[in-house]
Amino acid sequence: MTNTVLDINNLVVAVGKKPNGQKIIDGISIQVRERETLCLVGESGSGKSVTSLTVMGLLQKGSLGPTGGSVKLVGEELLTATDRRLRQLRATQMAMIFQEPMTALNPVVPVGRQIDEVLRAHTDLDARARRKRILDMMEQVRLPQVERIFASYPHRLSGGQRQRIMIAMALVLEPKLLIADEPTTALDVTTQKQILTLIRDLQRDHGTAVLFITHDMGVVAEIADRVAVMRQGRLVETGPLDSILRNPTMEYTRNLLASVPSLVPRPAREETKEPVVLEANDLGKVYRERSFFGKGREVVAADRVTLTLRKGRTLGIVGESGSGKSTVARCIVRLIDPTSGGVRLAGREISDLSRRLLQPHRQKIQIVFQDPYRSLNPRVTVGESIAEGPINYGVSRNDALKRARELLELVGLPADAVSRYPHQFSGGQRQRIAIARALALDPDVLVADEAVSALDVSVQAQVLELLDEIQKRLGIAILFITHDLRVAAQICDEVVVMQHGRVVEQGPAGEVLMHPREAYTKSLLDAAPGRGWDFANFRPVADGVAASA
Amino acid sequence: MLGYLVRRIFAAVPVMGVVALFVFLLLRLTPGDPAAILAGDNATPERLERIRTSLGLNEPLIVQFITWVNKLLHGDLGTSLISNLPVMKMIGQRVEPSISIALSTIILAVVVAVPLGVIAAWKHGTWIDRFVMGLSVLGFSVPVFVVGYILIEIFAIDLRWVPVQGFKSISAGFGPFFERIILPTCALSFIYIALIARMTRAAMLDVLGEDYVRTARAKGISEVAVMMRHALRNAAVPVITVIGTGFALLISGVVVTESVFNIPGIGRLTVDAVLARDYPVIQAMILLTSLIYVVVNLLIDVAYTLLDPRIRY
């Protein structure tokens, strides 16, 4: 039996200082042992981040605080430790990496110095020894040109490189415990795979205990030794990876796993002879950075993108960040103007229309954005938001509001929601509202730009189902932009894979995702976490293939 | 960096050009004959004609402008209509007191206000925070002349620590210079302390919610290091902006202080010139204040690039 590094016992964390405040964490117990990765899984609001911040002693003072239980790090109680002792333990015994590498580093200090700060605070090494140790650590996290990166500011580095810097900073003093709070959620799949491998390798070399927080079952399948499922501040169940994935005992865990979209595309729908509603021909977008003096810079965001979408079908554009998928979507909706090529909407060329002439065509194509927390005006009622579009197109206010009520029912919300404000709804409900808003104009084409990416899996599944149902009822065509191949596999008829602004591969979803021809598509699929598992059926994909054979 | 500076200085030239044009037209385009305005109500026709010729008013407007700019570039700002002294010389005599007070005020304000703001943000929501914010409301609401007279009453009249008013050039020795400048500086800095402390607190509160501050704490470094190395430097950009514009406003806003403490600065010069319709002096003052604004803005922008490596032009 190896040593227990972290022992959380019956921990309670509550709002405020009073003992009877609302409990955010309600009596959870978790152990993490040396050389072990425990994945703490749960949807947003389940309390997984609060748990990790409690261990580090980083909870916002005054707003949240532990009121019961114990947290022991290698036998030492943390909840009663002084601030001074906690500071000594941080980075030396326990370290943490965070979700958002883009904002987790101080933008005005070179990254080498930010790592150096850890050594200066906790060791007596001289400058040269510190530098040597940092460069060595930077090589261990497989950063290229370590000397150059040492002196670089964070904004010069990619997301993956920044996360490597965070890992180097966390592990440079070889802590016993590493807490990783959604460390790969903000990264592209290929980078995610590299970072997961890196964490696993470093853990093996240093014998670190890892508490890995994630909402992504794919990541869990890749990295966990044991899994703890949390929901609303309570522990649902804990167990070894294999038994959680194969034989979850609790209903909640079963539902969670069943909501994970499969990488295996859904059965193809029959080809239709419906009319083409949207065409992009050789669409291009070049950003020119003009400068007052000197020469400007050019960035090709989209290059000769051609795609066709028929009525009642769903076309997916998949790709990593910076691939140009959102640029293409925005050019098609004419939120930005393409620099070359054409867009035909219901047979009418719209790419060269002036803003004024475009206006009547706008209602035929509507967009739903990624973040439902920011895409609805917080000071306007939901009904007004939905009715605004039709009113602009001459519908009377009463008719528009009546239609808004119908649409809310269509997207599965009560009709009386019209008079409420966005903050009164959850993320999933807001995305339903955003869809209702888009549908209010009876568009021919609905563009969904990462429309389910910010949602928890169970909510994501519901929204995908909703889109599918709406498509069947209204015969609307959907252009679906996503970085998530699992989602693409479940909703798209055709798929376009983009990289560096260009279309790499396109074709029927089943074809592209099951038998990719291009190396890039293959690498994307290969990097998809948990590709070996068929979560919804509680078995590895290989077993499923064997069973159906 | 050097290239950037040179570019920015060149970019300031057209700005000053527009200001010069405006200042020039100020006199030429005011309704009525400029010469009549200059000469006053009881001027004889001969005197009017003399003024017209001396100002070149009979030439076409464009020629007048070129001549005027040419003189300007040679340091000739014209002659005061009241004192008949060259304007350049009048301003030269008055600039030192005003610049001294403005500089000492801004230094005192920064030295006091930035730490206050940082502490208020750090101890957010505690009595310290409320105390600092209370002070700042007070600083905003009490006019500078009230503060000035109170300070004079206490420190000059009752305690007799410093002279009541007046100004001594720094060339007359630091002691006399300092004891005369200290009260106006304190009085004037009151509102700037309030302003900068508020701004620092707000900027710090923003930054303290950032992820990298959490990262810094997770490293186990001391709170002082978190505040100074990670938070303050990132909060500096808005604070520098306020300090810079504050300084520029100071230059034009020292009038009241100069009156209260009887200091012969450019503030009073301007007021006197306006009341006496001394147009050449007014023109020169507008040019000078615009120049100060342009220079201060340039310095603010340079400070941005030094503070934040992401800002590049």
Image (cartoon, coloured by chain):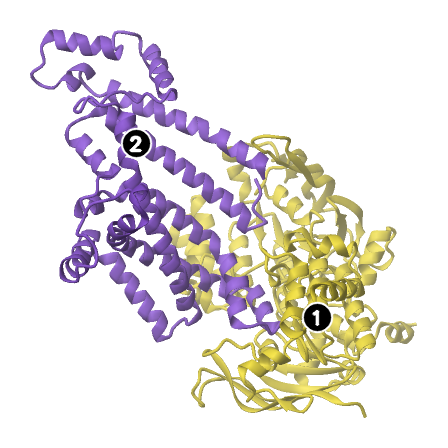
Chain colours: A yellow, B purple
Is B297 situated above or below A143? above
Q: CA distance from mark 2 to mark 1?
A: 57 Å
Question: At 69% from the left edge and 83% from the top edge, which residue is drawn?
Answer: A228
Mark 2 is surrounded, within 10 Å at the Cα level, by few (under 14), some (14 to 19) or many (20 or more) other residues, namely: few
Question: At 76% from the left edge and 52% from the top edge, which residue is drawn?
Answer: A494
Q: Position of residue B230 (x, y in %)?
A: 55, 62
Q: Is B31 in front, or is B304? A: B304
Q: Position of residue A346 (x, y in %)?
A: 63, 40
Question: Callout 2, which amino acid?
Answer: Gly
Q: Are marks 2 and 1 in contact (CB under 8 Å)?
A: no
Q: Quadrant of the C terminus of chain A?
A: bottom right
> Would residue A239 be found to the left or right of residue B307 on screen?
right
Q: Is B50 in front, or is A191? A: B50
Question: At 46% from the left edge and 42% from the top edge, which residue is drawn?
Answer: B299
**Residue B167 sits in which quadrant?**
top left
Task: Same chain for labels 2 and 1? Say yes or no.
Answer: no
**Residue A292 sits in which quadrant?**
top right
Q: Quadrant of the N terminus of chain A?
A: bottom right
Q: Residue furthest front?
A: B173
- What element does badge 1 sit on? loop
Mark number for residue B92? 2
Task: Tell me, yes or no, if residue A214 can be seen here.
Answer: no
Q: Position of residue A378 (x, y in %)?
A: 44, 60
Q: Please report, as a chain letter, where disc 1 is located.
A: A
Q: Which residue is mark 1?
A: A125
Q: Is B40 in front, or is A220? A: B40
Is A223 situated above or below B251? below
Question: Callout 1, which amino acid?
Answer: Leu
**Residue B42 sits in which quadrant?**
top left
Q: Is A122 in front, or is A237? A: A122
Q: Position of residue A212 (x, y in %)?
A: 70, 76
